[in-house]
Image: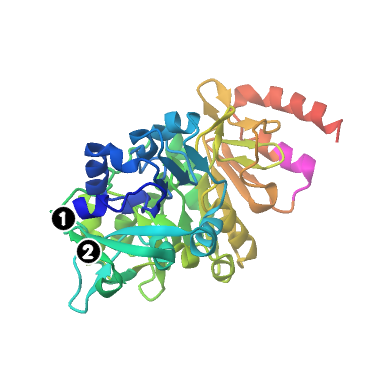
Amino acid sequence: MRALLDLFTPGATIYLPGATGECLALTQALAQAPECMAGVRVVSCLLPGFNSFDYPALHPEARLTCFMLPPALRASFERGQIDLLPLSYSQIAHYLGARVSLDVAIAQVAPPHANGQCSLSFAADFTPIAWPRARRKVLVINPALPALKNAPTLSLADADLVIEIAPTPLVAASARSHGAIEARIAAAIAALTPDGAAIQMGIGGAPSAALPLLRDHRNLSIASGFIGPEIMALWQAGAFNAQAPHVTGMALGDAGFYQWLAEARGIRFASVLETHDVAALGALPRFTAINSALEVDLFGQANLEWRGARQMGGVGGAPEFGAAAQRSAGGRSIIALPSLVGAQSRIVVKLNTPTISLPRALIDTIVTEHGVAELRGKALDARADALIAIADPSMRATLEQGWRTLRATL
């Protein structure tokens, strides 16, 4: 690992995989040698709920370029050591593939196949895009990473440095438990999802709760940037079409899920250039995008990023998936969220956030535990009425009055 740390030199820009591609052996090594981060810029798509290592906190002269803001990085963001680029996933891919200059790209891979190709396994999102851009390329071979056959590979011959480490734990998470509110939302989502749908599921409680309820569906396919362990039960129940392509970019789960992926033959992992290609996804019939939000207003636009005035995340792939659903024959873009957080309504008259994450034109359907608001083809007042009807009952009168006041100014 010392040879790898020697590449962390002042002025260097270094790409590190985020999400489940993050190399925990490297984070441990950097934590023990924080001086290596002096003057170094890390570029990585670190994700809330996946990644918690604060790279720039290791040294006052370190910097990080990222695209979302995991909570553990809040202090470095407030110190001004983080450059947060407000890009969607396809825009991040363009940035990494054409705009940023990388001195080093580091990739964690599985042990090589006989032909010298190393699988990126279930973390194929951005590394295949950044890898060709780097002046120096480093492979970190982790035997704990399963060598998935249906995943992009990197060649030993292309690497300037190859480091083999002892089996090191992977970024992982246990399956989530779901409460009664999420269960009601999930049931509504399942009823909206047709047989034969190409499904995309976002990261969040409502999408993951909905998947187990699709067990009796048939001829489904995966067209998603992300999958979780809920996929296993659907697969075993015969919900997926064995002849259809099933494509995703990354997976997060526990060791049992990762072992199942190693043995599954029907799921292919691909980079964001494929998993978030609006034209290709839009050509799929019944493309059904299932995502969550923090707030939705009565215009039908969503906040995915802000809690009050504080940045909590990013838009991710939601804009691409919403646009694809608009193109798809029989497609649907679903945003699911509980009606309340604490005593506050998550359906509001008008978003009061610094930015709007997902415009109203990219959302067809809003789901809460109180029902479904179908927005496609509805005019302003009808949209507002539909959304008020699925708000918490205690909030509806306030929302109605707020809409009347706002409507008079339009």
**Residue 268, image x, y percentages:** 35, 68
Amino acid type assigned to the residue bearing label 1 in the image: Ile
Q: Which residue is mark 2?
A: 162
Q: Quadrant of residue 176?
A: top left
Residue at 64 percent of width and 60 percent of height: 326
Residue 188 in sight from this viewpoint: yes
Residue at 86 percent of width and 31 percent of height: 409
Could you say which is closer to the camera, residue 316 or residue 82? Answer: 82
Q: Which residue is mark 1?
A: 165
User: Is residue 21 shown above or below 185?
Assistant: below
Residue 216 in sight from this viewpoint: no
User: Is residue 275 shown above or below 377?
Assistant: below
Q: Is residue 106 magenta?
A: no
**Residue 37, image x, y percentages:** 34, 42
User: Is residue 143 shown above or below 69?
Assistant: below
Span shown in magenta? 378-385
- How did the renderer colour the structure? rainbow
**Residue 358, image x, y percentages:** 62, 46
From the viewer's perspective, is the residue at label 1 or at label 2 nearer?
A: 2
The Cα–Cα distance between marks 1 and 2, rounded to whole angstroms, is: 10 Å
Amino acid type assigned to the residue bearing label 2 in the image: Val
Outermost residue on the left side: it is 166
- Please give left or right for residue 337 compared with residue 108 in the image: right
Could you say which is closer to the camera, residue 109 or residue 343? Answer: 109
Q: Is label 1 in a helix, a strand or a loop?
A: loop
**Residue 13, image x, y percentages:** 42, 52
Mark 1 Cα within 10 Å, few/some/many (few <14, many 20+)? some
Count the numbered circles shown: 2
Residue at 65 percent of width and 53 percent of height: 362
Q: Which mark is residue 101?
A: none
Quadrant into which the C terminus falls: top right
